[in-house]
Amino acid sequence: MSVVEYYYYYYYYYYYYYYYYYYYYYYYYYYYYYYYYYYYYYYYYYYYYYYYYYYYYYYYYYYYCYYYYYYYYYLAVMRISWSCTF
C-alpha cells in the first residue's frame, strides 16, 4: 500500500466515522428533545386537568352546600310561617 492509498483510506474511514457519530448524536439529540417535549406537555396537561377537576369539585361542593343552605332556610321560613297561621 502506497502512502497515497494509506491517507486515502485513513481519511475515508475518518470521515466515515465522523459522519456516523455526527448523525448518531444528531438523532439521539432529536429523540431526546422529542421525549422531553412529550414529557413536558404530558406533565402540563396532567396538572391542568388536575386543577380543572379540583376547582370543578370545589365549586360543585360550594353550590351543593349553598343549595342546601337555602333549602333548609326555606323550610325553616315555611315552618315558621306555617306555625303562625294557626
Image (tube, rainbow, N blue to C red):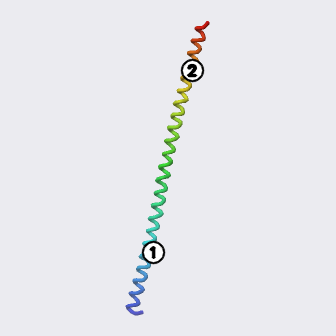
Q: Is residue 38 above or below residue 25?
A: above
Q: Quadrant of residue 86?
A: top right
Q: Secondary structure at mark 1?
A: helix
The mark tally for this picture is: 2
Q: Quadrant of residue 17?
A: bottom left
- Name the residue beneath numbered marker 2: 72
Q: Please provide percent x and percent y for residue 84.
A: 58, 8
Q: Is residue 78 left or right of residue 32?
A: right
Specify the amino acid type for callout 2: Tyr
Q: CA distance from mark 2 to mark 1?
A: 77 Å
Q: Foreground: 85 or 66?
A: 85
Q: Is residue 68 above or below residue 79?
A: below
- Name the residue beneath numbered marker 1: 20
Q: Is residue 5 above or below residue 47?
A: below
Q: Secondary structure at mark 2?
A: helix
Q: Is residue 27 left or right of residue 81?
A: left
Q: Is residue 48 above or below residue 62?
A: below
Q: Name the residue: 43% across, 81% down.
A: 13
Q: Name the residue: 50% across, 47% down.
A: 46
First in residue order: circle 2 vs circle 1: 1
Q: Foreground: 55 or 81?
A: 81
Residue furthest out toward the bottom: 2
Q: Name the residue: 59% across, 14% down.
A: 79
Q: Foreground: 57 or 11?
A: 57
Specify the amino acid type for callout 1: Tyr
Q: Please provide percent x and percent y for residue 6.
A: 40, 88
Judged by depth in the image, the label closer to the viewer, 2 or 1, is 2
Q: Name the residue: 49% across, 45% down.
A: 48
* Quadrant occupied by the N terminus: bottom left
Residue furthest out toward the front: 85
Which mark is on residue 32? none
